[in-house]
Amino acid sequence: MKPAQALFAVLAAWAMVLLLCAAPRGVDAATACDATKLTPCAGAIIGNAPPTAACCSRMKEQQPCMCAYARDPNLKRYVNSPNGKKTMAACKVPVPRC
């Protein structure tokens, strides 16, 4: 399985968990935490490509959810990875301090 496919599979699984659970504490009710919305960022986080406009838009939309993603055992390696942090910086999204 290619790294991008693996990320998509993990993000899809996480989305299912989010659909079954309430939004994490501290997240605005208008923000729907859905890790699959970050799939446009797969190339930047996994492949070290520059983030696209779609990636940055989604990253900003999902910013309130980043701590929840950083705590999830399946997603934290992407949030905390050097490329994940570089992508957040390029998109002007603060790295979560949870």
Image (cartoon, helix red, strand yellow):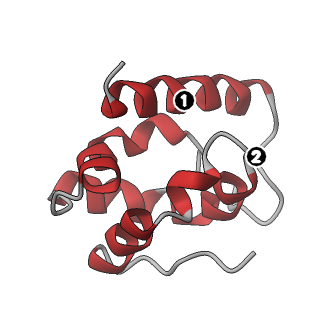
Image point (68%, 80%), residue name: 97
Question: Which image quarter is the N terminus in?
Answer: top left
* 20 relative to 84, above or below: above
Crowd rating for badge 2 (residues with CA inside 10 Å; few <14, some 14–19, many 20+): some
Residue 44, x across and y down, in percent: 26, 55
- Between 31 and 93, which is closer to the camera in this rendering? 93
| Residue 84 falls left or right of residue 96 | left
| Residue 60 falls left or right of residue 20 | left
Q: Quadrant of residue 33?
A: top right
Residue 83, x across and y down, in percent: 36, 65
Type of residue at label 1? Answer: Val
Type of residue at label 2? Answer: Ala
- Between 14 and 44, which is closer to the camera in this rendering? 44
Distance between the alpha carbons at the discs numbered 2 and 1 = 18 Å
* 73 relative to 79, above or below: above
* 51 relative to 73, above or below: below
Q: Residue furthest front?
A: 1
